[in-house]
């Protein structure tokens, strides 16, 4: 698909939503197609959330057309479906910089535009945020409208339920648009999803019911009684047969379901509900990937995609060199290997089966695989429940999303010393998804919890051994590993157990000690190699465990090498380096010079993983530079 440049496009004349409010329906429909093409062509180059954004083009146009944005507040859930919103709200000329270093974010971001009312990236926040904005409007005695757009996947999060439960009863003027494409990343799960499905087919059920009632009435005497009985049943079954009755019961006026790609209908409906002045839920049915056949056919694959060829829908080929298997893949493969011989191992995902590498496990052991939906808190406490009954649940969640379940890890798993394994994928920088998605906090937030073992492998081979160790250890454990390909390590045939709390010396030396953990071990080795050429002799330690730490080994090193660098792909405050300092302090080691490399007290921006590691001085170059400065008796420059 290419943009027709033979005439001036409608989009070229649209600078902000005010410009679309002057267009007729025919022009709006053409504009929708122009926007689609820009989204497809841009994401084909930059990668991004294609299918979700293609599904909301008409909805976005209709909302900006009917409402007075940015005076009226439009709040998106997750925010991965907002590419049309970005293009329409003054960012079309920089849209090509999507998700790149210094470019525009792939999610709504307050600093980026007044149209991005609420920064977002994690699911389920929109209704709460919209409810807060609505209450603020009332306190300030202002009159703008509040509109939250939430997907059917995000609608299954605990937060969305909590917010609906509260906001309906407040009876304030608040519009929620449920963008229902029947998909989360994969098919949506759970009773809410089945309910929405029943609502969509509600007309059929209602018709069937009236046919049965008509039939009963035709049966003399007994039919009358049965008819009266069904009237009682009808009340009780209201939620099953009246579309949207669940939302009505929660205090929302339910409107829908309506077709989400018909602009005329969408606009008419939005105009009608705009002035209702109470909580309204508009149920809109859309198609994920709409307008790009490959994405329509495989919406999960095109949910979040790297650069691809528009003509074929295939990923752009790399330079042909073999790529090492990803950490995620090795995790998934090891899960299958371990589960083959251990029937107590279960796997749990929070709507990320593919992303966490559990597809094969799900296929091989369906009875021990659980997709709980976008519900990280439930995932962890559900795992705790399984663990009390002698199972060994492995909860595979991205590090950033585990932040949601902190209390569940603390209160439900660690306090009870339950053998739950937290497989923390995407630990460290994730790259182009940016600050909402970097997994930079887990080492700090987990190591402060009693009873938990916290580890991070230096490569994909060690990941398999750590997983075997975690499953065998009998208590709470977390393993964090990075996004993307492994380092190309040779894989041992079978995973074996590691000594808990034991690190390893990978290289000996006497001038500087580099104590690294997880993804920073390989750059530490590379830095040592560079430094050796400059006659700086470096010890490199793979700490393996952040908790319990190998105190004997680290104190022994600190007694002989006085220049110490710790390296972690994690926030420094409370992280691995802090743990090393605590260890030295507790052991009376005061005569060492320790420099901690990691992420300072700030949110890291979007860029590639390599760019981010260099920016934060935790790549080989940054580590070597810190060692050189130490040797010259200078404090390393703060990154
Ligand atoms: C707390 C949290 N867990 C997981 C994710 C990963 N994630 C991003 S989008 C998505 C599916 C959202 O589905 P839906 O709301 O229906 O939007 P759609 O993409 O179908 O339009 C998931 C699970 C997330 N963003 N936040």
Image: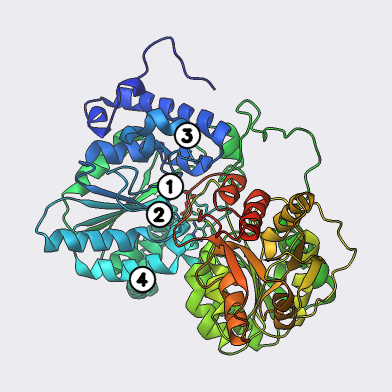
Q: What element does badge 1 sit on? A: loop
Q: CA distance from mark 1 to mark 3?
A: 13 Å
Marker disc for residue 120 = 2
In x, y percent, where is residue 425?
63, 61
- Is 335 located above or below residue 298 in the figure? below
Which residue shows up at 58% across the image and 65% down it? 596
Report crowding for label 2: few under 14, some 14 to 19, many 20 or more residues within 10 A (C-alpha): many
- Extreme residue toward the right, this view: 493
Marker disc for residue 107 = 1
Q: Nearer the viewer, residue 359 or 223?
A: 359
Q: Which residue is mark 4?
A: 162
In x, y percent, where is residue 272?
20, 45
**For the residues bearing labels 1 and 2, Cβ distance under 8 angstroms:** yes
Q: CA distance from mark 4 to mark 3?
A: 36 Å
Say which quarter of the image contains residue 250.
bottom left
Report crowding for label 3: few under 14, some 14 to 19, many 20 or more residues within 10 A (C-alpha): some
Tell me if residue 219 can be seen: no
Looking at the image, residue 258 sits to the left or right of residue 624; the answer is left
Which residue shows up at 21% across the image and 26% down it? 22
Q: Which residue is mark 3?
A: 97
Say which quarter of the image contains residue 269.
top left
Which residue shows up at 52% across the image and 20% down it? 2
Report crowding for label 4: few under 14, some 14 to 19, many 20 or more residues within 10 A (C-alpha): few
Q: What element does badge 4 sit on? A: helix
Q: CA distance from mark 4 to mark 2?
A: 18 Å
Say which quarter of the image contains residue 113.
top left
In x, y percent, where is residue 410?
53, 82
Tell me if residue 409 can be seen: yes
In x, y percent, where is residue 341?
85, 75
Q: Nearer the viewer, residue 608 or 515?
A: 515
């Amino acid at each position: 698909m290419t943009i027709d440049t033979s005439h001036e496009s409608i989009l070229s004349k649209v600078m902000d939503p005010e410009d679309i409010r002057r267009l007729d329906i025919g022009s709006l429909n053409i504009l929708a197609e122009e926007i689609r093409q820009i989204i497809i062509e841009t994401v084909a180059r930059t990668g991004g959330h294609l299918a979700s954004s293609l599904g909301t083009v008409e909805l976005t146009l209709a909302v900006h057309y009917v409402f007075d944005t940015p005076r009226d507040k439009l709040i998106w859930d997750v925010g991965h479906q907002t590419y049309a919103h970005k293009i329409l709200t003054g960012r079309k000329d920089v849209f090509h910089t999507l998700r790149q270093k210094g470019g525009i974010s792939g999610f709504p971001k307050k600093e980026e535009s007044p149209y991005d009312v609420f920064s977002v990236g994690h699911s389920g926040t929109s209704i709460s945020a919209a409810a807060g904005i609505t209450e603020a409007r009332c306190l300030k005695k202002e009159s703008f409208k509040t509109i939250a757009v939430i997907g059917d996947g995000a609608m299954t999060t605990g937060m969305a339920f909590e917010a609906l439960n509260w906001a309906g009863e407040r009876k304030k003027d608040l519009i929620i648009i449920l963008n229902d494409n029947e998909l989360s990343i994969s098919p949506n799960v759970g009773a809410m999803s089945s309910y929405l499905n029943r609502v969509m087919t509600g007309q059929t059920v209602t018709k069937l019911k009236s046919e049965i009632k008509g039939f009963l009435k035709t049966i003399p005497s007994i039919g009358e009684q049965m008819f009266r009985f069904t009237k009682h049943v009808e009340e009780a079954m209201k939620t099953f047969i009246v579309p949207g009755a669940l939302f009505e019961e929660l205090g929302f006026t339910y409107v829908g379901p309506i077709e989400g790609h018909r602009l005329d209908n969408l606009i008419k409906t939005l105009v009608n509900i705009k002035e209702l002045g109470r909580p309204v839920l508009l149920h809109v049915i859309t198609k994920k990937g709409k307008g790009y056949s490959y994405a329509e056919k495989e919406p999960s694959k095109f949910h979040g995609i790297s650069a691809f060829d528009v003509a074929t829908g295939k990923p752009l080929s790399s330079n042909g060199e073999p790529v090492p298997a990803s950490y995620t893949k090795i995790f998934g493969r090891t899960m299958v290997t371990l589960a083959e011989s251990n029937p107590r191992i279960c796997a749990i995902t929070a709507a990320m089966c593919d992303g966490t590498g559990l597809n094969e496990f799900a296929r091989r052991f369906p009875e021990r695989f659980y997709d709980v939906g976008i519900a990280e808190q439930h995932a962890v406490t559900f795992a705790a429940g399984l663990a009390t009954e002698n199972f060994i649940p492995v909860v595979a969640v991205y590090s950033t999303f585990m932040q949601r379940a902190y209390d569940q890890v603390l209160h439900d798993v660690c306090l009870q010393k339950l053998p739950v394994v937290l497989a923390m994928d995407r630990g460290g920088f994730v790259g182009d998804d940016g600050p909402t998605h970097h997994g930079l906090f887990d080492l700090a937030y987990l190591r402060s919890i009693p009873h938990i073992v916290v580890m991070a492998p230096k490569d994909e081979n060690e990941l398999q051994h750590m997983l075997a160790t975690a499953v065998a250890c009998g208590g709470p454990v977390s393993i964090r590993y990075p996004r993307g390909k492994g380092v190309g390590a040779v894989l041992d045939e079978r995973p074996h157990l590691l000594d808990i709390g034991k690190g390893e010396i990978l290289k000996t030396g006497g001038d500087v000690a580099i104590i690294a953990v997880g993804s920073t071990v390989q750059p530490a080795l590379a830095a040592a190699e560079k430094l050796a050429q400059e006659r700086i002799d470096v010890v490199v330690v793979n700490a393996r465990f952040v908790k319990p730490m190998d105190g004997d080994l680290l104190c022994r090193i600190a007694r002989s090498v006085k220049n110490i660098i710790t390296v972690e792909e994690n926030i420094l405050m409370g992280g691995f380096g802090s743990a090393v300092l605590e260890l030295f302090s507790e052991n009376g080691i005061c005569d060492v010079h320790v420099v901690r490399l990691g992420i300072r007290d700030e949110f890291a921006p979007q860029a590639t993983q390599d760019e981010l590691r260099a920016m934060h001085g935790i790549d080989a170059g940054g580590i070597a530079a810190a060692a050189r400065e130490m040797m010259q008796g200078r404090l390393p420059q703060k990154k």
